[in-house]
Image: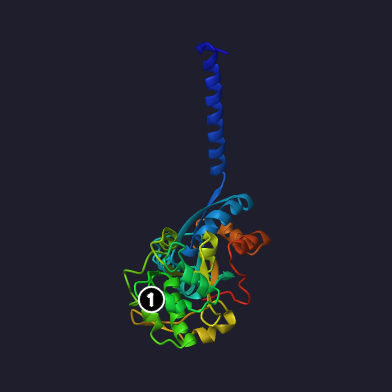
Amino acid sequence: MKYSRARLLPLGILALAGVCAGLLARAGATKSLTPLQVAYAGSMGSMMDGGIRPAIAKALGAELQGRAQGSSGLANLIVAQSIRPDVFISVTAAPMRIVLKAGKTKSAIPIARTEMVIAYSPKSQYAAALAKASDRGAQPWWQIVATPGFRFGRTDPNADPQGLNVIFTMQLAERYYHQPGLAGKVLGPQINAQRIFQEPQVMGRLQAGQLDASSAYKTQPAALGLPFISLPAEINLGVASMENEYQRASVTLSGKAHRPSPLVFYAAVLKDAPQPKLAGRFLVWLHGPAARQILARYHYDDPGDAKPLVP
């Protein structure tokens, strides 16, 4: 059937009007959401973008504006007033204590916990051996990752708790497996530019096969479908009741000694939050059933008997 240009023109105008109406409706919906600025540990990126963001848009009418980075780095930026988020979420107590000590918040509540694992690339030449090691094969995981030329990635211990935690884990592994010097064989020097990357980059490098393995929290490779090796409770920093055993490890940075804490995530509303009421509602929501389901789906464990932090 043929139509004249005169008859097609009104149809085109109607179609264009429909598209414009849809765009305006979506823009209006976005404008109706109140921005909520959350600075959170970089390891939480997948859950924040894929689970929390759409959930709080619906439940709280909030638009998550996240900043993902190492917790220690974020804490220092908050104290220096370089950033001004509504909520800060750290992994381990140490970064949150920096913020508490500076008077930037009154308290912090535990919302979840995780544990250290060894994530590895399915594209690695060592993938088959690591898969067998994860099933308690004949060759132990620590022997494989200590192989000369093995590409093991990690984050900066000066800026990211995970960068510290992998050193703690390897020190504890030395004692647990009776392997003196293991940490140095796997990690190299404490500050090793060839093996240190920004936290969001590490998983991407594993996916691309640019690394053979890396340190990780259990939540990270599980969310991306990457394989990983679970570690014994004695070295994985995931059991609150084993804190005294974990503190046998120690790392000195810039003349200051650091000791490990259980891998608990803490959340706090900051005193100068642009949206303090919404931030408070967000923390309450994090303890509700909807948030607990999302946390579990992304492989975060319940915080158990972890206590709130106060100055």
Q: Nearer the viewer, residue 102 or 17?
A: 17
Residue of label 1:
147
Residue sitting at 47 percent across and 83 percent down?
Answer: 172
Instruction: Say if 184 sits above or below 86 in the image.
Output: below
Q: Which image quadrant: the N terminus? A: top right
Report the colour scheme: rainbow
The total number of labels drawn is 1
Pick the front one: 119 or 76: 119
Q: Which residue is rendered at x = 39% and y = 66% of the image? A: 80
Residue 289 image offset from top left, x and y in percent = 68, 61
Residue type at mark 1 is Thr
Under circle 1, the secondary element is loop
Say left or right for 292 vs 26. right
Residue 270 in sight in this render: no
* Position of residue 180 measured from the top left corner of the image (x, y, whole percent): 40, 87
Q: Residue 139 versus residue 146: which sits nearer the camera?
A: 139
Q: Position of residue 150 (x, y in %)?
A: 37, 71
Question: For residue 157, which quarter of the picture?
Answer: bottom left
Q: Residue at (57%, 79%) from the top-left corner?
A: 239
**Vertically, is 237 above or below 266?**
below
Vertical placement of residue 26 versus 108, above or below:
above
Mark 1 closeness class: few <14, some 14–19, many ≥20 residues within 10 Å:
few
Image location (x, y in percent) of residue 24: 54, 34
Res. 9 in view: yes
